[in-house]
Image (cartoon, rainbow, N blue to C red):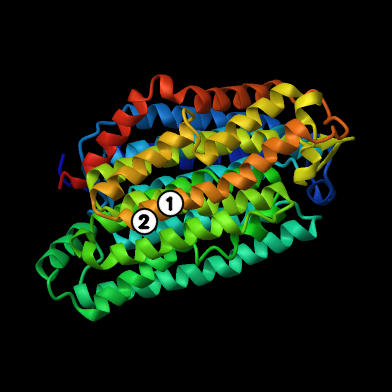
Amino acid sequence: MGENGFNFMPAWPELFLAVGGMLLLMIGVFRGPKGREAAATWSPAHAINARSVTWLAIGLLVITAFIVSGQPIERSVIFAGMFVSDAFSIFAKLLILLGSALTLILAIDYNEREQMARFEYAVLILFATVGMMAMVSANDLISLYLGLELQSLSLYVVAAFRRDSLQSTEAGLKYFVLGALSSGMLLYGASLVYGFAGTTSFPGLAAIVADQAAEAPLGLIFGLVFVSAGLAFKVAAAPFHMWTPDVYEGSPTPVTAFFSVAPKIAATALFVRVMIEPFGALGDQWWQIIWVISILSMGLGAFAAINQTNIKRLMAYSSIGHIGYALVGLVSGDETGVRGVLTYVAIYLFMNVATFAVILCMRRQGKSVERIDDLSGLATTQPLLAAALAICMFSMSGIPPLAGFFGKLYVFLPAIAAGYYGLAVIGVLTSVVSAFYYLRVVKIMYFDEPAPAFDQPIGTAMCIVLAGTSLFTLLFFVYPAPLLGAAAVAAAALFAG
């Protein structure tokens, strides 16, 4: 379907979720404790209110996912060409909604135990999700920025959500300052692109870039570099990763889990769309940027994580490395490469959620522990929990036949087919290096002397999420066709025009 400014159906999921989020905000305000003291001091009444609002928010995300899955995969453009709905955006939105819902489930018990359960948390996650969905449907540099900032403003707040923690406040402040810097870089790049191309719309840029591909203006190339740098910050790719370890470690663990999944998937999908659609004809220019970012991310993720003792900080460097692997698929700039990127981030979602579910279970005497050594002998005290984390560690290492192996396979093969042998070799070598710290976690769990057991039980919802994500990671090879098929259709949508 072509452009139609009066047809709001392609944006119906975003509109539904935004209105639902505002309704939940009102419900939380009117049903929650009243008065100045109630607002300042946490009480069990806050927990009851937060739990009900959170489950309603999860319900909204599930309904929105059904709405998204029911949309036609044909390309639809609305809002004066600023918003597009196609198979690519549908695939990315479903992953974003799934990641947001799972991390909300993980947050419920933790927030109550840490006396930070407030209804605003779930509402902020919903608004961040609306921003992420708008990002992946952006068809203009202006709508891209609006979606990005709607997401970012919510994330700045949730990073500092634990108000009585200096670490959480520091994480929120660092994220805000560096996020503002990256947004400035992105805006400066967009202004350069507009100045030299005369348009901000993706189709308009694609047409102009195609005409000038042989002799593209230097200002346009500079604009593309700044836009790429701004997006690289959002996906936490090196050398724009500096915020990631501190924010991951300082933020409340459910927030860290959310950061590592939904926003990363949204930013990666946006990165792919921006490189392929408006600037696809400049592939000879931007592949060098992605090539360098990918190598730096894989190398940093592999070597910087070796000496980490905090598991959340280890997962921060791990996420940087995984973004490097995902971007290997983008370097090839073709349909197969984009399919590999989408497959990789989908598998990464399940591996990461399962890992953070285990991290959230790391409690002793009611207090959370985060040191890797705290996992000593976990296979003896809680074998099922150890098995779930071992599956995730082996998968992230890329050991067959687990899902992580296929994720890396589907990004390395397009790079090899496109002639980027060096990039693929570096990817394999950094995978071997990163296997050291992943397998060290397994060694600590299975061969070290048992530490005191973690608190039990871990909660029904947590068990279901942990079991589901672990089994997907373990058994993906049995029937990978649905995910691979959906990723192929999504990738084809970017090249259909």
Q: Determine which of the numbered discs, if any, sits on residue 187 in the image.
A: none
Residue holding disc 2: 423
Q: Which quadrant of the figure contains the N terminus? A: top left
Outermost residue toward the bottom in this view:
218
Query: SS class of the residue under badge 1?
Result: helix
As drawn, 469 above or below 235: above
Q: Nearer the viewer, residue 49 or 329?
A: 329
Between 163 and 493, the one lying in front of the other is 493
Mark 1 to mark 2: distance in Å? 6 Å
Q: Residue at position x 27%, y 72% from top?
A: 193
Image height check: is 107 above or below 239? above
Residue 19: where, in percent of width, then height?
47, 40
Where residue 306 sits: x, y (%)?
A: 65, 54
For this orientation, the residue located farthest to the left is 211
Does residue 91 appear to the left or right of 297 in the view shown? Answer: left
Q: Which residue is mark 1?
A: 427
Residue at 31% of width from left, 69% of height from top?
Answer: 224
Q: Which of the two residues, 118 or 423, is positioned nearer the viewer here?
A: 423
The location of residue 156, given as percent across then percent down, is 60, 58
Residue shown at the point (21%, 58%) measured from the top left: 280
Say if mark 1 contacts mark 2, CB within 8 Å: yes
Q: Amino acid at mark 1?
A: Gly
| Position above or below: 137 against 363 | below
Image coords of residue 215 (percent x, y): 14, 76
